[in-house]
Image (cartoon, grey):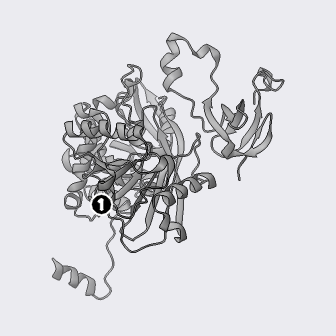
Amino acid sequence: MKIMTCPVNGPRNISEFQWLGPVHAEDEARDETLVERLFLAPNPMGVLREWWRHTPSNTVFIAERNLISDEILRTWLKGSDADKPTSAA
Amino acid sequence: MPIELLKYGLRRGHRPYRDIPSTPELRRSYDVVIIGGGGHGLAAAYYLSHYHGISNIAVLEKGYLAGGNTARNTTTVRSNYLTLPSIEFYREGVSLFETMSQELGFNVMFSQRGQLTLAHSDAAMRSFRLRAEMGKHAGIRAEVVDAQTVQELCPHVNMDFGGQHEVLGGLWHADGGTARHDAVAWGYAKRAAERGVEIHQRTEVTGFGIAGGRVTEIRTNRGTVLAGQVLQAAGGMNGRIAEMAGIRLPIRCFPLQAMVTQPLKPFLDILLSSSNLHTYLVQSSRGEIVIGGGTDPYQLASTRSSLPQKEALATGALQLMPFLHNVKLLRQWAGITDITPDFSPIMGASPLQNYWLDAGWGTWGFKATAVAGKRMAETIATGRVPDILMPFALERFARFELLNEMGATAAGH
């Protein structure tokens, strides 16, 4: 069983989670970058920061995951202490 | 011919001939370098060498011949898509499969047995009506059938598993079929090699030299080569290879998983899929039931399988055919697919003058092996993208001219 740690509910089965896609910088939503924002999603051969949802509790949070090894590096709530620019991996 | 075959077989100490030559030394330069030794790249090499008089070609394959998504797909050949450009393109693809064994003198075991997609909801039936009408308009065989016809076409299917999942009807696509994936790649490789095309296995592209808007050299783990024209047809690695050439593609990697059961006596003589259950079943010529479905639910570039996805595939298969519950699984695997935002491929020109793209084939590339190879060969030989490929250009995203095939692709491949 693959486990993901929900920042509110702790370690849970991955089947309880829904993947919501990459975290975008807020300044990406501009006219000049619209096409890129809509269609050129990041596809790194490394770590991606992305939105996830714990569906039973409807907890939406951020995770960092390695897209080669599928290792979940860390999870946190937006706006929490962990959610600071200096903590970027 | 049978006498010749008999004599060959009975000859003392005969050696089986080699279909694919061993990998030669890399030469300094080629007219065309094809990145990716899968079905698409090999087909392009075949059409270039047999129809356009270009045989100074190197096919670069980082692993072994046709060992990526050509080996991992579930061999569905069909044309019942939703948009007109797609249907016309895939229609040509199906017609090339119909004559492929004769064309190549190589048995690709094409079995045009028809594909039945089941609907378990009104929404699915509505989308089938649209696809059937679009298909008729484009001249393919696609029709909506009722539940009784579903039962006649496939007596083994469980018509009623209660609640929202009972079978309401289906989309019958008589042109649909299946072929032997390895044979397709080997047939193209063998005939291309006969014309002098060099197939370089275990030759990985590591970078490009770019000057004046052109690729000037291709660096590999076995040396650097110069190329007049370059075709990228690298399957799951398309995003990464394009990045090396400084091109960003609207591609994300998702694993696609499949599995086969132990061999059973022949009973399933159509391709069966369900758009609601995201599962499809086909019986191979060896009797194995091939079980496939949609991609993994989240982005990943790994060929490792996962238990939840295998369970989902098995659940769908058992709902369609509960009598399979005691059948053992024989093999399972995963491949990395290159998914585009609209579930249509990217073919044609790139921002570099001599660099051509055959990418974004996601979960649906096998059926287009022949037509993509043929049309990309035409593109490279003439320097002009043929009309049939124009709608699939990379620039369609910037123009918001997407070819949305998500609904016609999701579990049908």
Is label 1 in a helix, a strand or a loop? helix
The amino acid on which the numbered mark 1 sits, given as a three-letter code, is Glu
* Front residue (pair B123, B109): B123
Q: Residues within 10 Å of mark 1 (few under 14, many from 20)?
A: few
Above or below for B219 versus B21: above
Residue at 54 percent across and 58 percent down: it is: B314
* Front residue (pair B249, A10): A10
Please give the chain letter of the residue carrying mark 1.
B
* Front residue (pair B207, B173): B173
Q: Quadrant of residue A55?
A: top right
**Residue situated furthest front in the rendering:** B163
The percent position of residue B372, horizontal first and vertical second, equals 30, 43
The percent position of residue B25, horizontal first and vertical second, equals 42, 55
* Front residue (pair B38, B90): B90
Residue at 57 percent across and 44 percent down: it is: B301
Q: Is residue B371 left or right of residue A39?
A: left
Q: Quadrant of the N terminus of chain B?
A: bottom left
Residue at 51 percent across and 23 percent down: it is: A38
Marker count (numbered):
1
Location of mark 1 (residue): B152
Above or below for B181 versus A29: below
Q: Is residue B138 visible?
A: no
The percent position of residue B128, horizontal first and vertical second, equals 33, 41
The percent position of residue B222, horizontal first and vertical second, equals 49, 50
Above or below for B51 versus B112: above
